[in-house]
Amino acid sequence: MYRINFFFAFILLVTSCSDGNLEAEKLKLEKEKLKLEQEKLNLEKNKGAEPAKEDGKSTQVDQQASSGNNGKINGNNVLVRSEHSIQGNRKAVLTNGQLVKIVDEYRPEGNDNEAILRSATPFYNDYSGNLVFTLNKGKAVMIESYEGNQYKISYEDDKTGKTGYAKISSGQLEFISGDVWYHITTSSGIDGWVFGKFIQKL
């Protein structure tokens, strides 16, 4: 009787050890798999990183954005803003073809009052007053109100501090609600948000 019980106890001990070894091996394989996935993600993130400068100048901005994508400005006098909205403070102006690093992106909601001009438009000191300035196609403007197909818009010139108003049809506006904005940095230290239409990913 004791011999039989000892035999079954021995078999149980061997089985439990085998199960424990299998669990340990399984855990080890899972850890290796996770490690490989992490390495793969890191490689993909660093794929677009630029090499460090060799002129001894600070590359802090580029290093901060090393996990981002490269981009190129696609437009003339493109504004960099403090936030992802045309109401954000204007921090800098970028030139056509200038290279940037894209570090983040955002699609704002509730910005139905923002749009871009499809054609050159004159602005007045009132909706039908004296001419203040004319804006070229591609400028971002604020929608003040609309009635039917007519939109009242405004634009504040940061250089002169003057605000102009215009009344145009919906066909003259490109509505940008929900469109992407990119958080960018440059090698010269510029940091801010640019409307996605004016950036070409490389």
Image (tube, helix red, strand yellow):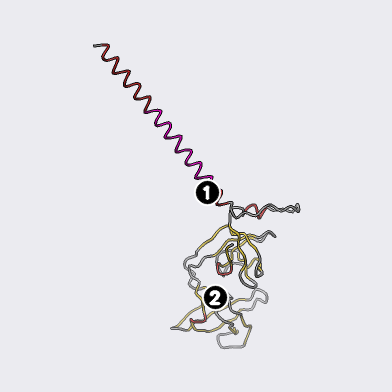
For the residue pair 78 and 34, the one nearer the viewer reads as 34
Name the image quarter holding the N terminus.
top left
Residue shown at 66% from the left, 69% from the top: 95
Q: Are marks 1 and 2 in contact (CB under 8 Å)?
A: no
Place of residue 14 in the rendered image (x, y in percent of width and height, measured from the top left)? 35, 22
Mark 1: which secondary structure? helix
Q: Label 1: which residue?
A: 41
Q: Which residues are magenta?
A: 19-42
Which residue is outermost to the top?
A: 2
Q: Quadrant of residue 190?
A: bottom right
- Furthest residue in direction left, as rendered: 1
Labels 1, 2: front one: 1
Q: CA distance from mark 1 to mark 2?
A: 37 Å
| Residue picked out by circle 2 | 116
Badge 2 crowding class, 10 Å Cα cut-off, few under 14, some 14 to 19, many 20 or more, is some
> How would you rate the neighbour count of disc 1 (Cα within 10 Å): few for under 14, some for 14-19, many for 20 or more?
few
Q: Is the stretch drawn in magenta largely helix, strand or loop?
A: helix
Residue at left 38%, top 24%? 17
Q: Is residue 79 above or below residue 145?
A: above
Secondary structure beneath dot 2 equals strand
**Residue 195 placed where, x, y %?**
56, 67
Quadrant in which the C terminus is drawn: bottom right
Verify whether residue 30 appears in magenta.
yes
Q: Is residue 5 magenta?
A: no
72 to the left or right of 2: right
